[in-house]
Image (tube, rainbow, N blue to C red):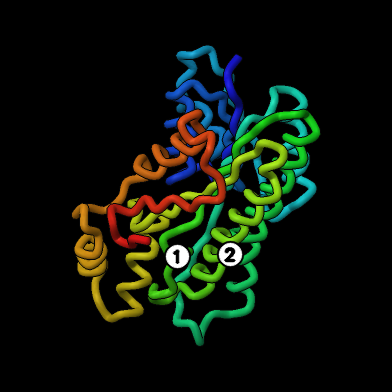
Amino acid sequence: MTSVVVITGSGSGIGRSIAVSLADRGWSVVATDLNEAAAAETAKLLSTAGGQQHMSRQLDVTDAAAVTAVADEIADTLGLDAWVSNAGVSFMQPFVDISLEKLDLTLAVNLKGVFLCGQAAARAMIRTGREGRIVNTASMAGKQGRVPFLADYVASKFGVVGLTQAMAFELAEHKITVNAVCPGFVATAMQERELAWEAELSNSTPEAVRDSWVAATPLGRLQQPEDVARGVAFLLSDDASFITGESLSINGGAYMD
């Protein structure tokens, strides 16, 4: 019987890479995304070499009822062993120009969504007697505020790091571990948008911004989604069974703590 993991925001980018990596390691994956078609496409890409059964669900992580419904469905039909809260959004603007609407959306998806998903997953695991694992996607920007044009994002990801610790502390008695991953400059579609935004805001070019990101990374390249996926796979593995409350920096040395 394979272990089952739900992954939010897995229709593309880091989330899709996490889904592929875990399926390759024998996990049965429930791919979820706000974009139902993208989640379904991810599910089609996943390995079934170990006899796994994969599925997809449309999910708005800011909708508490919807999140609870998915967690309970999977817990009651397949057994919920792990949950990866990866869904996120970003926008780039100077701090003084960030609108209330953008702030609300960033906090709703990046922080409230992680809270609601963690709560629903933990409740389902406790109710069904599962000693589970939860991994949250934070960011290098959740450990340092020295990031241009991303004040709302920084606030949300610092929140995820703190929330991860609070969850880990309270859920330890139920044998549920909670950790986070903190990626750096990851080459995804989201990053392409950020390159263009930062270039415009700093009167530069996307190529020059990309070069500056590589220069800021001691290992000398942009991070790939697979780099993050391998870190998540580790935190869900038996090798990490005594690790909880940690926020694992996976950024090529761009930020060291």
> Dot 2 lies on which element?
helix
Q: Is 82 left or right of 137, judged from the image as shown?
A: right
Q: Can residue 125 be seen in the rendering of this structure?
A: yes
The CA span between labels 2 and 1 is 10 Å
As shown in the figure, which amino acid type bears the numbered disc 2? Gly
Q: Is residue 206 above or below residue 38?
A: below
Q: Is residue 207 visible?
A: no
Residue 145 horizontal side relative to residue 185, left or right: right
- Residue appearing at x 40%, y 44% in the figure: 228
Label 1: how many Cα within 10 Å (few below 14, some 14–19, many 20+):
many
SS category of the residue bearing label 1: loop
User: Which residue is painted at 61% across and 34% down in the image?
Assistant: 82
The amino acid beneath tag 1 is Lys
Which residue shows up at 60% across the image and 73% down it?
Answer: 103
Residue furthest bottom as drawn: 96
Q: Name the residue nearer the viewer: 23 or 218.
A: 218
Task: Residue 92: give its label.
Answer: none
Q: Residues within 10 Å of mark 2 (few under 14, many from 20)?
A: many
Q: For the C terminus, which image quadrant?
A: bottom left
Considering only order in the chain, which callout, 1 or 2, is on the residue closer to the N terminus? 1
Taking depth in this image into account, of 49 and 43 the one nearest to the observer is 49
Whether tag 2 and tag 1 are in contact, CB under 8 A, the answer is no
Q: Is residue 2 above or below residue 203?
A: above
Q: Which residue is mark 1?
A: 143
The quarter in which the N terminus is drawn is top right
- Position of residue 41 in the picture relative to residue 218 (left or right): right
Residue shown at 56%/37% (left/top)?
A: 39
Q: Which residue is mark 2?
A: 159
How far across and how far down the image is residue 5, in percent? 59, 32
Q: Position of residue 86 (x, y in %)?
A: 54, 48
Q: Position of residue 16 (x, y in %)?
A: 46, 39
